[in-house]
Image: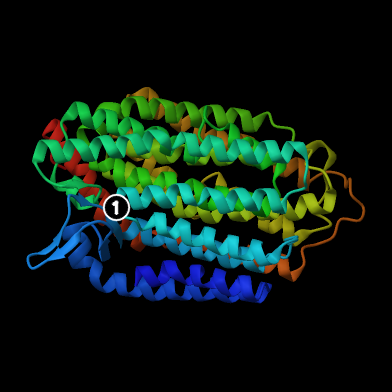
Amino acid sequence: MLLVWIGISFLGSVIGAIWPRRWVWQAVTLGQFGFGGIVGWTYLQRAPLEVSTTLSTLGVYQPWWGFPTPQGWSSRYLIGLSFATDGSALFLGLSICLVGVILSFWPHWSFTQPRLQIPALLILQSLVLWTTFSYDLLSFYIGFEAALFPMFYLILSLSTATAEVRRMAIEFLLYTLLGSLPMLAAILYGASEISRIHSVPFSTNFYDWLKNPLPPKVQEWVYAGFALAFWVKLGLFPLHGWMLSLYQHAPLPVVVLSSAWLTKLGGIGWLRWGLLLPEGHFALAPLVGGAAVLSLTAAGLAAYFQKGLRQWLAMGSIAHLSLVPLGLAATSPAGGSGAAWMLPIHTLLVSAHILIVDTLLRRTQTDQISEMGGLASQAPQLTALWTLIALASVGLPGLAQFPAEFLVLLGIYHSYTLKRAVFILALLSVLLSAAYTLPVLRRVLAGPSKASDFSELRPQEFIPLWVLGGLLIGLGFAAGPFLKEMARTVSPLMQAILYQTLGVRL
C-alpha cells in the first residue's frame, strides 16, 4: 500500500507532462490524499499488534543486489527498497499530502513551463513521501538528496530571473547537498562496522541496525554525522543561511515546499535513525540540546527585531523547528512525543502562515511592516485567519502547536541529559514567540489604514486557508489519539536508550 501511495504522484507527473493542466495536479493530489486515508485506516487495524512489537507496519522490502538461490536471496549487501510506517510517519505523510492539495488549489502560481513545472511539483511530493517512509538508510539518503533537484528547478523557474535568485538557488542546492555528506559517510562507516563486528552482510536496513548494535564510540561518530546532516536540512541556527535567502527571494508558495516538506525530512530522519544509536544519542544529547536551545533563542530574538515579514516568517519557522532536536535531546518519552508531534503540525502551520502572508504582500506590494497598518477594518476575514494562525504559532492552549511545546518542555524538565538551565531558556524562548508575533499583528492589522484600496480575501484564497485553520483548532482539541499512535514507537526507543545507558526503567 505504501508503494502505491508514494507512486500516485510519480504516475501523476507523467500524466501532467502529457496534459499540463492545473486540474491534473489537483486530481492527483486529491487522489493521493484520499488514498492516504485508506492507508491510515489499514494502519489502525494493524498497529496495535505490529507497531507495538516491531515498531512499524505495512512494510515492503525489495532487495537491490544479490541473486536467488534455493535457500533464498543471497547477497553480500543487504540494501534494498524498504518502506514501512509508524504513527509519526503516517501523520506526517497525511499532512504532506494535505498541503499538496492546498497548494494545487492555491491561485497564486505563475507557471511559465507547466509541462515541466507541474510534473516537478508532483515528483517532489513523491520523493518527500519516499523519504518519509524509507526504512533503509541508502534508500532514505537517495530520497533525501533527490528531492533537492526538482526543488532547485522550481526555485529557478518560478522566481524572477535575477542574479540574487540564481545565487540563492545555487546556495540552496550546494548548502543542502554538502550538508548531507556527513550522513553518507556515517551510513557507510556504520554499516561497515556492523558487518565487521557482527560478521553479517553489509546492511543499511533499519532492523539490521537495530539488532546489531555498534560500539559506543562508533555510535557517537555515526550519530554526529546524522545530526549534522539533519541540522542543515532543518535549517537551524547557525546553519540557516540557505533558508533566509530562500524566504527573501523565492515566491512564497515555493517557500512552502521547502519549509513544509523538505525540512521535515531532517526531523523524521532524526526521529527514526538517530534513536537507533542509544549510546551515541545519550553521549551527544547535551551538546544537541544546548545547540537547539541556542537556535530557539537566537531565532526568536532575531524575529523580534525584523523589519520585513519575509525574514520575520523565516526566523519564526527556525525557532519552531528548533523544538524538534530539543525534544529529542531531552531523551524522554514526553520530549520525543513532542518532537514527533511538531513535525506534522509545523507542516500545516507554516503552510498557512506563509500563504496568508503571500496574500498580504501581493496586495500591499511590500513586506516592510512599517508600511502596513489598519487592515482589520478592510479585510476582516484575513484578520480572523491571521489571528488564528498567529495564536496557534505562539502555542495557545487549545490550538495544535500547544501539545508539542508542552511535551517538549515537560520532557526537558524531567530529562536525564539536559540541565535545568536548558529548561529555563527553552521556557523563556517559547514565551518570546508571543513577543515577536503579537506586536507584528498589532502593527499590521490595527491603527490607521495605510492602504486605501486593500481588498478582502477571495474564495480561492480563504477556503484553503480555513481548511488549515480548522485543522489547527481541531487537532488542538483532539491530539490524544494521534499522540498515542506516535508513542507506540517513540516511547519504547526512548526507554531503551535510558535503560541501555543508565539502567533506568520508566
Secondary element under disc 1, as helix, strand or loop, is: loop
**Relative to 73, is 119 on the left or the right?**
right
Label 1 packing within 10 angstroms: few (<14), some (14-19), many (20+): many
> Which color scheme did the rendering employ for the protein?
rainbow
User: In the figure, is residue 448 to the left or right of 158?
Assistant: right
Q: Is residue 366 left or right of residue 216?
A: right
Q: Quadrant of residue 57?
A: bottom left
Residue at the image position 16 percent from the left and 39 percent from the top: 194
Which image quarter: residue 308? top right
Task: Name the residue carrying label 1.
Answer: 136
Residue 367 seen? yes
Q: Is residue 346 left or right of residue 360?
A: left
The type of residue carrying mark 1 is: Asp
Coordinates of residue 84 in the picture (x, y in percent): 30, 61
Asked if residue 480 is positioned above or below residue 498 in the image, the reply reads: below
Viewer-nearest residue: 160 or 293: 160
